[in-house]
Amino acid sequence: MAAHRPELWNENAVLDYYDQSECSMYRVYVGMVPSKQYCRYQWLDANNKPGGLENLRNALQAIQADKRNTNPYVLELISEIKEKQKGTKLVEQIESVNIGFKLNDDTFRPAGDNYQGGGGSSIILQQPGNSSRSYEEKIFEMMQEQNRKVLEQMQLMTEQINAREFIDDNDEDNDDDAADQPPPIMSGKQRIMGAIGSMLERPQVQSVIEMAILKYGASLMNGTNKQQ
């Protein structure tokens, strides 16, 4: 009888389930259908449960060691095996209880690994140091777009500052009592520097800087990998 879906999710849970059962014999099948062609491990000594426990532990550790193996499995606990004559063949009749388990999470993949397991969809997590060229190109395009927006904003602010200075100069020329007017608090250069400082505090500008650092770090890592 097939198990509907995994119910156990780690090595200890599977070992405890076996240890607490009254069965000593078992078979482990890959997938959720306990058919003979899918049998990967078995223990058929009904009088040696400690040996069966150790054998099952080794099997689970072998499965868990390969993180790319995200297949579900069925543990079939066998209470009795009988052989029945069917025509000219002897056919097994098994009394058993099945439970599904899965040890490896299929949402994790090493960067650049396109392996597809049998336990469902997989997600490939790419990291900057080992990513493809398309990843770097997308980052560069994003940086160019952000830089263009920042430059447009800075140009607009500079034009506004120049316009204000022109108005201030005209006001001073037309004022007969210009000597009594206080000097401007900030020069044009200081205003521009202040505007640049304000721009650097904006999240859009900070994201551009962060992406630039990320791209530089990725290029260094790629260079290191090539040298090795």
Image: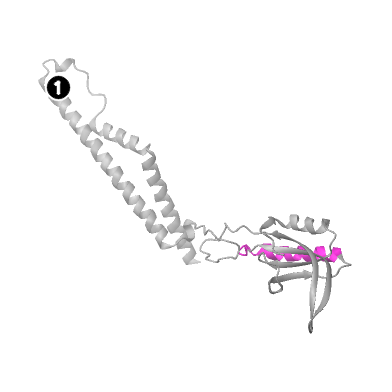
Residue 159 falls left or right of residue 72:
left
Q: Depth check: 135 or 99 in front?
A: 99
Q: Residue at x 18, y 15 (%)?
A: 180
Magenta-colored span: 49-70
> Which residue in the rendered view is the most extreme toward the right?
47
Residue 162 on image: x %, y %: 19, 33
Tell me which corner region of the image, top left, top right, bottom left or bottom right, holds residue 23: bottom right
Q: Residue at x 29, y 47 (%)?
A: 148
Q: Depth check: 42 or 163 in front?
A: 42
Residue 101 falls left or right of residue 82:
left
Judged from the image, the secondary structure of the residue bearing numbered disc 1 is helix
* Crowd band around label 1 with a 10 angstrom C-alpha radius: few (<14), some (14–19), many (20+): few
Residue 70 on image: x %, y %: 62, 62
> Which residue in the rendered view is the most extreme toward the front?
87
Q: Is residue 121 above or below residue 166?
A: below
Characterize the magenta stretch by its predominant secondary structure.
Answer: helix
Tell me which corner region of the image, top left, top right, bottom left or bottom right, holds residue 136: bottom left
Task: Verify whether residue 59 appears in magenta.
Answer: yes
Q: Is residue 210 above or below residue 113?
A: above
